[in-house]
Amino acid sequence: MRKRTVALITVSAVVLAAVGAAYWAGRDLFHEPSARGVDSVVAELGGERVLGVFAHPDDEQTVNGLFWRAHQDGAETAIITATRGEAGTQVPVVGRQEDLGIIREAEALKNSFNLGVDEHEVWDYPDGGVPDVDEAELVERIVDAMRSFRPDVVVAFWPASGATGHADHMEMGRATELAIAELAASAGSYRGPDHLVYTISPTKALSLFGGETGAFVVENQPDPEYAMSAEVGKKFEGWQIHASQRDYLPASYILPTWLVYALWDHEFYHVRDLAVDPLR
């Protein structure tokens, strides 16, 4: 009996050690050595008014932690979503495909409310067609939104990679930079934000699981300076709210959502101080 007990304890210890090793190896895929851990990127920058500029409903899922912490710290927050996401794939199917834009717009508005976001505009540019719209019109619309909300921190996609390689993301990142440059060159009372914050994707995980698109993103995005809590609970809530996209992570990366966030529990950001490094 004693030998069986010792053997059981030994096997259990080996299994636990293997599981622990696998867990920490998995977490390493979502670690960015260049990023310094902070409680809140917005608080670190002294931000009081934060505007996110994105392409699709559910893009705000990449920045849950930043917006939730900003709200908790008393900052005013707003989001622009350029499209209604009508061309997306439903995972699972929750409604008629012709109604998907209506469904996803409602999901985005509900999710941002759950994050404490004060204002949220969903525009009607074509999903998958943002690079084909008149860029001057798009830039001017972003300029007008910034003049109205007057953010000191803007959160956007890195134009060369768009966090996921999506052309809509890349164009919204580019248009946001052009809008900020236009404001800085203007003579108005509001000359644009103090900081531009880019959401950055984990490089090791993308390299391993992202295929050609992941390799493209890794090659074309900067290293992040900041890491902060992803507020995983809010991400889970967000995917339940985004019911038409609830199974996006398992469908895209095979791994179940709970496992992804057990490993990926931080968000990563690259920050441009526009006083030191202005856009031209």
Image (tube, grey):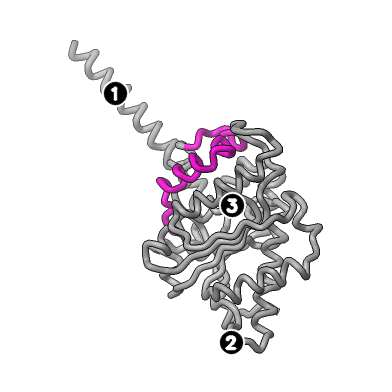
Above or below for 10 versus 111:
above
Residue at point 42%, 55% (across, down): 229
Residue 130 falls in image quadrant: bottom right
Q: Which residues are magenta?
A: 228-257
Residue 202 placed where, x, y %?
55, 51
Q: Amino acid at mark 3?
A: Asp
Q: Quadrant of the N terminus?
A: top left
Above or below for 49 versus 87:
below
> Which is more N-terminal, label 2 or label 3?
3
Q: Which residue is mark 3?
A: 59
User: Regarding mark 2 in the picture, which secondary structure is present there?
Assistant: loop
Label 1 crowd bin: few (<14), some (14–19), many (20+), radius 10 Å: few
Using the numbered discs, state the Cα–Cα distance from disc 3 to disc 2 in whole angstroms. Answer: 31 Å
Residue 221 falls in image quadrant: bottom right
Q: Is residue 196 visible?
A: yes
Which label belongs to residue 10? 1
Q: In the picture provided, is 214 more to the left or to the right than 117?
A: right
3 and 2 marks in contact (CB < 8 Å):
no
Label 3 crowd bin: few (<14), some (14–19), many (20+), radius 10 Å: some
Above or below for 28 versus 55:
above
Does the segment drawn in magenta span residue 253?
Answer: yes
Q: In the picture provided, is 270 more to the left or to the right than 184?
A: left
Q: Is residue 223 visible?
A: no
User: Is 128 in front, or is 225?
Assistant: 128
Q: Which residue is mark 2?
A: 189
Residue 3 placed where, x, y %?
22, 14
Mark 3 or 2: in front is 2
Using the numbered discs, state the Cα–Cα distance from disc 2 to disc 1 in whole angstroms. Answer: 71 Å
> Which is more N-terminal, label 3 or label 1?
1
Q: Amino acid at mark 2?
A: Ser
Residue 33 placed where, x, y %?
49, 58
